Amino acid sequence: MTEELLFLDRADVLECAAEVDVCQVVADALVRHARGAATLPPEGHLPWTNEAGADCQSLAMLGALEGDGGPPVRGVKLINAATCNPVHGRERAAGIGVLFDHHTARPLVIAEAGWLSAARTAAYTMVSLRHLGPPAWDALTLVGCGTLARTHLELLGGSFAQTRTVHLYDADVRRTAALAEWTAHHLPELRIVQHADARTAVRAAPVVVTATTTDRGYLPPAWLRPGTFVAHVSLADLLPDALLTAQALYVDDVDLVADNPRRILGALMREGRVTARSPGPVGGRGIDGTLGQVLAGDVAAVRPTTGHVVSNPFGMAVLDVALLHAVHEVAVTRKTGRTLRLS
C-alpha cells in the first residue's frame, strides 16, 4: 500500500494561513484546553553548545485536542534554535510540525513550523490583550526586535486597529533599525519610535511585549507604570519582583510552567514563592488562572489599573497543532503543497 503525506513549505503555510483567523483558532484551542479536552505530554528538550560556543537546543512538543465539540487533532512540533543564527542572517529558530491521522496514526502532513510557532505566540498575545489588557490603549512596546516581534506586528493591525505608536528596543541596534524599516514599509500607518535603552522603551507604552532570547532577568517592577499589561512571552526578562508584585498573573498551563525551571516563573514556583492558585503565600503570590479559564468564563479577568498585569505563557503544543490543522484544511481545499511518497 502506498504511504503518502502532504508537505507545506513556508510559502504554502503563509498562503493558507491568510484564510485562517489565527487568533480565533488559538482562542478555541485555549477553551478546549481549559475544559480538559487537551493532552500535553512532557516536552523533550535537548541542549548543546556548538563549535562557536553558541547555545543550541531542540524542543519536541507533542499535543492533542479531543472532544468538547471539536475534531480530534494530534501532532508534534519540532523546533530547533541556535543563539548564533541571527548573526549569520538566519532566524534564531526553525522547525517542522506534523499532524497525525486519527484513524491510522500515520503522519498526515509535515509543514514548516517556524512561522507557525511565532504566529501562535503572537496570537496568544492578541487574545490575552483582548481580555486582560488595559481598557484603552493606542501604543505598544516591543522589547526584542527579531522574528517574533515582527509576527506580533503582523497580527496587531487586524486585532487592534486603534494602535498608533510602536516603541522598539533591542540590545542589537541593527535589529531595532531593521524592524523599524520593515514596519515603515509594511505598516506605514504606525508611528515608530526607536529607543536606545530598555527602560525608556518599557515606560513609553501601557502594553509591553518581551520577545527576547535572554536567560537573565533585567526588568524590575519600577519600570512598569501603573496600568501596564506585560506579555512576557520570552524566558526571563522580568525580575522576580515584577511577577511577585503583579496586580494579576495569568499563564497558559500551570503544570507546564511549574515544571520548567528555565523560566523565571517556574523557578519561583519551585521555590514556593508563587503558588498554583491565588492567593499566594506571605511575601509571594498565586497564579490567578489560565487564559483559557478566562475565555471559558471560569476565572475572572483582571485588567491593569493601579498596578501591572502579567501574561506569562509557557507555549503549548496544542496551539501549534490546532493552527496547523486549520492551515492543513485550507491546503486540502486549495490543493496547495506537494505530496511526498513514503513507500
Image: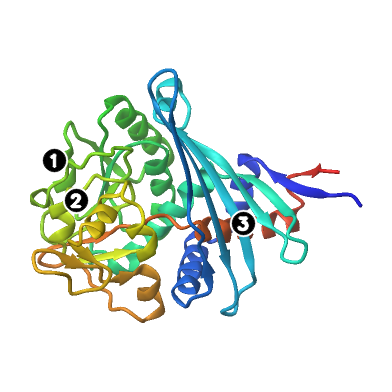
State the image coordinates of residue 190 (x, y, percent, origin top left): 32, 45
Residue identifier under label 1: 200
State the image coordinates of residue 239 (x, y, percent, origin top left): 17, 48
- Residue density around tag 2, few if under 14, some if 14–19, many if 20 or more, within 10 Å: many
- Residue density around tag 1, few if under 14, some if 14–19, many if 20 or more, within 10 Å: some
Q: Real-space Cα distance between discs 1 and 2? A: 9 Å
Residue 209 position (above or below residue 72):
above
Residue 29 position (above or below residue 312):
below
Say which residue appears at 16% left-offset and 34% top-offset: 197
Report the disc number at residue 205: 2
Residue sticking out furthest to the front: 271
Say which residue appears at 28% left-offset and 27% top-offset: 172
Residue 123 appearing in the image: yes
State the image coordinates of residue 15 (x, y, percent, origin top left): 63, 47
Circle 2: residue type: Ala
In the figure, is residue 309 to the left or right of 211?
Answer: left
Residue identifier under label 3: 75
